[in-house]
Image (tube, rainbow, N blue to C red):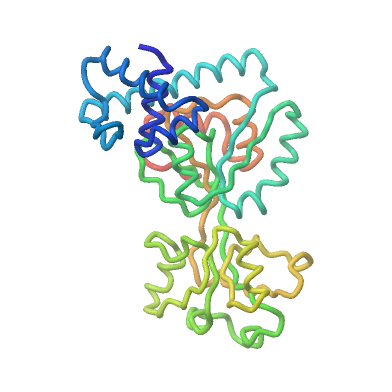
Amino acid sequence: MKLQQLRYAVEVYRQNLNISDAAEALFTSQPGISKQIRMLEDELGVPLFVRHGKRIISVTTPGKIVLETADRILREVQNIKRIGTEFADQDMGSLTIATTHTQARYVLPKVIQTFATRYPLVQINIVPASSTAINHMVLNGEADFAIGAEMVSDHPELHKLSCFAWNRSVIVPDGHPLLSLTRPLSLQDISAFPLITYDYAFDDHSHIARAFAQANCDYPKVILTSPDSEVIKTYVLNGLGIGLAASLAFDQQRDQGLQQINAEHLFEPSFSQVILRKDAYLCGFAYEFLAMFAPMLTRSRIESVLYGSFDEDFSI
């Protein structure tokens, strides 16, 4: 049994049983993957996959157990490599952070600037994606950790660490009728106009959806959604509707032609959060990055989550 065989089988599983996509992801040939998986099955004495002709159509019962075990083995191998790298070159390496567009654009730049000055030989990879996608990236070992907000982390292998609160504002073009209000903004005011907001804004777990439901207020007509605050502001400026976005995403000097209306009294605050795998090995500079992002995330606190006996999300 070879690690390469396990890696090939796991990648086919990750790529929705598509051998061609797995071969592309691993920079190898489709016949080579098929051959190595067959050899692994012969050695184990059980098939991992159900086939129809040359196509893989499902995973067998023993195959699911083998693939889950192989996935853990491959992650531990990666952890071993990271341990060796850390002790050989403590100030060198790479750090991959999956994060939402808002965090990448408005929260992380100063942190990354400070970190890059301290660790000039560390390559930082920022991967902006949706909240769901960044969770999966951490789960699959594609990112060292994720930074996002209002994320649902119900996988037993993930831990969520809440850091600091943020809330929302309504963004409108200059001269918009909402700017003439002499009272605080209401949910009914928002519902009166076409809305541009985040793609998750009216998911069941969202604070925005919850606010409208608790107030028994009709949802606004959502005309466009995006995970990116800059996209939301662009279409507000073009007159498509009003925007509902993180307050921290607005800058009066930069966002010419737009105005911000405070909506923080209408919604529960959300929290910027760090998502980690329970079995992750973080190198020393990863801990320092997290402490720069949120000083309360000390190494001892993070390790108590990763290697302690916590059974639920850890909030600070």
**Residue placed most toward the observer, 130 or 120:** 130
Residue 290 x, y percent position in the rendering = 60, 37
| Residue nearer the viewer, 249 or 228 | 228
Residue 263 in picture, x, y percent from top left: 57, 72
Figure label count? 0
Q: Nearer the viewer, residue 243 or 298?
A: 243
Residue 183, image x, y percentages: 59, 85
Q: Is residue 62 left or right of residue 269?
A: left
> Can residue 297 be seen here?
yes
The residue sitting at 37% across, 73% down in the picture is 214
Q: Position of residue 136 (x, y in %)?
A: 44, 41
Residue 252, quarter of the rendered image: bottom right
Q: In this view, does 57 lie to the left or right of 259?
A: left
User: Above or below — where is 277 with respect to 267?
Assistant: above
Residue placed furthest toward the front: 53
The answer to whether 301 appears left or right of 108 in the picture is: left
291 lies above or below 237: above
| Of residues 55 and 255, the one drawn nearer to the viewer in this rendering | 55
Q: Which residue is drawn at 52% across and 42% down?
A: 274
Q: Which residue is drawn at 70% across and 40% down?
A: 112
Image point (59%, 58%), residue name:
228
199 w.r.t. 217: above or below: above
